[in-house]
């Protein structure tokens, strides 16, 4: 998964298509992300000791394939650029994220 927590994304499929938000959680094992303000569901919480029962609205996970990285107001694909750098006589590989159409570095 090329997305990270804190990335701004746009939803490209599903009931919230076109919504924009920031990634709160990345679940790499299940290829899911939780985006702020997207895929809201209601959860009924039972009353406990000293607390009342209530209805909570929270974000549910959405498939990472249904979101795109947001750059300059448009959704773009992400890729990696791998470079070999020589430091102190040792070869070191540096991997950076790039936006696919422009080649612009991210982060």
Image: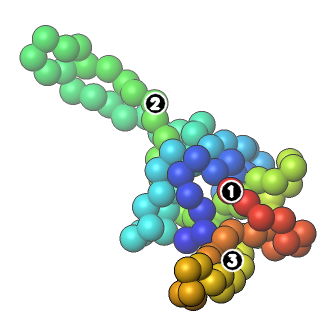
Counting other residues with Cα less than 10 Å from the Cα at mark 1, is it few (<14), some (14-19), or many (20 or more)?
few
Position of residue 16 in the picture relative to residue 64 (left or right): right
Q: Which of 100 and 75 is in front in this view?
A: 100
Give residue 79's position: percent from left, percent from top. 71, 75
Give residue 3's position: percent from left, percent from top. 60, 62
**Disc assigned to residue 107:** 1
Counting other residues with Cα less than 10 Å from the Cα at mark 2, is it few (<14), some (14-19), or many (20 or more)?
few
Counting other residues with Cα less than 10 Å from the Cα at mark 3, is it few (<14), some (14-19), or many (20 or more)?
some
**Disc assigned to residue 80:** 3
Position of residue 73 in the picture relative to residue 47 (left or right): right
Q: Nearer the viewer, residue 103 or 28?
A: 103
Residue drawn at (32%, 31%), measured in percent from left and top? Answer: 44
Where on the picture, by quarter, is residue 47?
top left
Location of residue 21 with respect to 10 vertically, above or below: above
Secondary structure, mark 2, is: strand
Position of residue 16 in the picture relative to residue 33 (left or right): right
Asked whether the beta carbons under mark 2 and mark 1 sit within 8 Å of each other, the answer is no
Residue drawn at (60%, 69%), measured in percent from left and top? Answer: 2
Q: Distance between the residues labelled 3 and 2?
A: 36 Å
**Disc assigned to residue 76:** none
Secondary structure, mark 1, is: loop
Secondary structure, mark 3, is: strand
**Residue to which mark 2 is pinned:** 57
């Amino acid at each position: 998964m090329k997305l990270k927590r804190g990335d701004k994304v746009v939803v490209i499929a599903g009931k919230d298509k076109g919504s924009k938000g920031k990634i709160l959680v990345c679940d790499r094992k299940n290829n899911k992300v939780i985006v702020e303000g997207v895929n809201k569901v209601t959860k009924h919480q039972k009353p406990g000791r000293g607390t009342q029962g209530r209805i909570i609205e929270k974000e549910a996970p959405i498939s990472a394939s249904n979101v795109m990285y947001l750059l300059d107001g448009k959704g773009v694909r992400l890729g990696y650029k791998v470079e070999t750098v020589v430091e102190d006589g040792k070869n070191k590989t540096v991997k950076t994220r790039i936006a696919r159409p422009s080649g612009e570095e991210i982060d």
